[in-house]
Structure formats: C-alpha cells, structure tokens
C-alpha cells in the first residue's frame, strides 16, 4: 500500500495551525481570567443605571410596545 504525499496534508496543517495560535490562546486566557458572569452582570447593571436611569424597564416596555404596534400595522397593510 503506497502512501500518497497529500494524505498527511490536513493533519499537518492542523498541527501547524495549533502551534501558530498557541501564544494567542494563552494571551486570551490570561486576559479573560478574572472575567466572571457576576462581574459582567454588575458592570452591565451599573452602566444601565448610569446611562438609562432607574426607569429602564419602563423605557424597554415602551420600546417593545412600539415594535409590536409597528409589526401589527405592517402585517395589516398587506
């Protein structure tokens, strides 16, 4: 059984790709090491309180109601 030179192209390419991205993967794992869901939740909550205000749920409800009326009006047009 003869081995064709192209038979090892995909495994060798995957191994080289893994070696080329090893530093990048370690950099990303170190950069996002302290990032947790609790930290992200607190950060998003603080940003919403700062930029939107404590009545963010009313604004979101009005926006969703506007989208719903737009969709209903658009559907009745046809």
Image: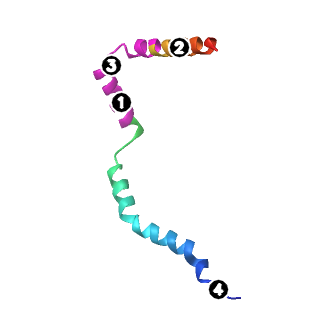
First in sequence, mark 2 or 4: give its number.
4
First in sequence, mark 1 or 3: give its number.
1
Q: Position of residue 52 (x, y in %)?
A: 32, 19
Q: Which residue is mark 3?
A: 52
Q: Position of residue 22 (x, y in %)?
A: 40, 65
The verdict on residue 52 being magenta is yes
> How many C-alpha atoms fall within 10 Å of the one at disc 4: few (<14), some, or many (≥20)?
few
Q: Nearer the viewer, mark 1 or mark 3?
A: 3
Q: Which residue is mark 4?
A: 3
Q: Position of residue 5 (x, y in %)?
A: 59, 83
Q: Quadrant of residue 27?
A: bottom left
| Above or below, 19 relative to 50 | below
Q: Which residue is mark 2?
A: 70
Q: Which residue is mark 1?
A: 44
First in sequence, mark 1 or 2: give its number.
1
> What range of the chain is rendered magenta?
39-62
Which residue is located at x 35 percent, y 26 percent?
A: 45
Which residue is located at x 37 percent, y 54 percent?
A: 29
Q: What element does badge 2 sit on?
A: helix
């Amino acid at each position: 059984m003869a081995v064709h030179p192209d038979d090892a192209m995909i495994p060798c390419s995957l191994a080289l790709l893994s070696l080329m991205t090893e530093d990048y993967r370690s950099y990303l794992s170190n950069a996002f090491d302290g990032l947790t869901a609790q930290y992200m939740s607190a950060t998003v909550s603080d940003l919403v309180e700062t930029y939107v205000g404590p009545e963010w749920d009313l604004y979101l409800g009005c926006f969703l109601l506007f989208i719903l009326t737009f969709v209903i009006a658009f559907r009745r047009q046809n």
